[in-house]
Image: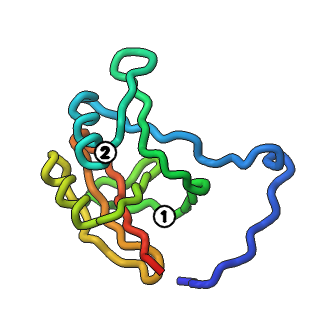
């Protein structure tokens, strides 16, 4: 495993006019009211009905943050026998232990023990009430 950073390559010509940052995420649910209640109770997110039935805009907070960073990694099994499919989201939280308790208290499951990446984050993965898998991470403070 390499721990040094390579210089970023120059932007490709076709991306120069737009930064191509991740613009949205979507949570797919069989029971939308149950999923909405889970994310409201665990993360304090606000849901606004918009468009067709059972379709909501999600307000995750007012904090201004830089563009979402991405990772490319080998597919893995966070749940035994089920490789991750699609994009994986990780949610920043102020208190990882409290968030893990809130996940379990509101019908979710913690599927990995939390682990620490020195000088970066502590992270754990969970499954929500709809079977979706995501991460929660607490940034290291300098």
Task: Say above or below: 138 vs 127.
Answer: below
Indicate which disc residue 127 carries: none
Q: Residue 65: percent from the left, percent from the top?
A: 55, 55
Dot 1, how many residues are within 10 Å of its Cα: few (below 14), some (14-19), or many (20+)? few
Identify the residue at image location x=76%, y=44%.
18
Q: Is residue 46 left or right of residue 113?
A: right
Identify the residue at image location x=21%, y=33%.
34
Q: Residue 74: percent from the left, percent from the top?
A: 48, 64
Identify the residue at image location x=34%, y=21%.
54
Dot 2, how many residues are within 10 Å of its Cα: few (below 14), some (14-19), or many (20+)? few
- Which residue of the protein is positioned furthest toward the top in this rendering? 52
Q: Is residue 85 left or right of residue 112?
A: right
Q: Nearer the viewer, mark 2 or mark 1?
A: 2
Q: Secondary structure at mark 1?
A: loop
Task: Say above or below: 59 vs 122.
Answer: above
Mark 2 and mark 1 residues within 8 Å of each other at the beta carbon: no
Q: Toward which corner of the image does residue 37 lie, by quadrant?
A: top left
Task: Say above or below: 43 vs 3.
Answer: above
Identify the residue at image location x=30%, y=53%.
82
Q: Viewer-proximal residue, 21 or 131?
A: 21
The residue that disc 1 covers is: 74
Q: Toward which corner of the image does residue 46 lie, by quadrant?
A: top left
Task: Say above or below: 80 vs 28.
Answer: below
Q: How many marks?
A: 2
Q: Residue 92: percent from the left, percent from the top?
A: 41, 59
Figure coloring? rainbow
| Distance CA(mark 2)–CA(mark 1) | 32 Å
Q: Toward which corner of the image does residue 116 lie, by quadrant?
A: bottom left
The residue that disc 2 covers is: 44
- The first of marks 2 and 1 along the sequence is 2
Q: Residue 2: percent from the left, percent from the top?
A: 58, 84
Q: Secondary structure at mark 2?
A: loop
């Amino acid at each position: 495993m390499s721990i040094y950073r390579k210089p970023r390559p120059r932007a490709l010509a076709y991306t120069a006019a737009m930064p191509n940052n991740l613009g949205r995420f979507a949570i797919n649910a069989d029971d939308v009211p149950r999923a909405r209640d889970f994310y409201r109770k665990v993360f304090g997110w606000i849901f606004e009905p918009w468009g067709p039935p059972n379709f909501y805009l999600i307000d995750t907070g007012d904090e201004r943050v830089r563009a979402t960073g991405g990772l490319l990694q080998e597919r893995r099994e966070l749940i035994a026998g089920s490789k991750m499919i699609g994009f994986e989201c990780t949610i920043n939280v102020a208190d990882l232990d409290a968030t893990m308790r809130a996940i379990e208290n509101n019908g979710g499951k913690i599927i990995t023990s939390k682990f620490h990446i020195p000088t970066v984050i502590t992270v754990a993965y969970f499954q929500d009430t709809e079977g979706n898998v995501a991460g929660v991470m607490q940034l290291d403070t300098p």
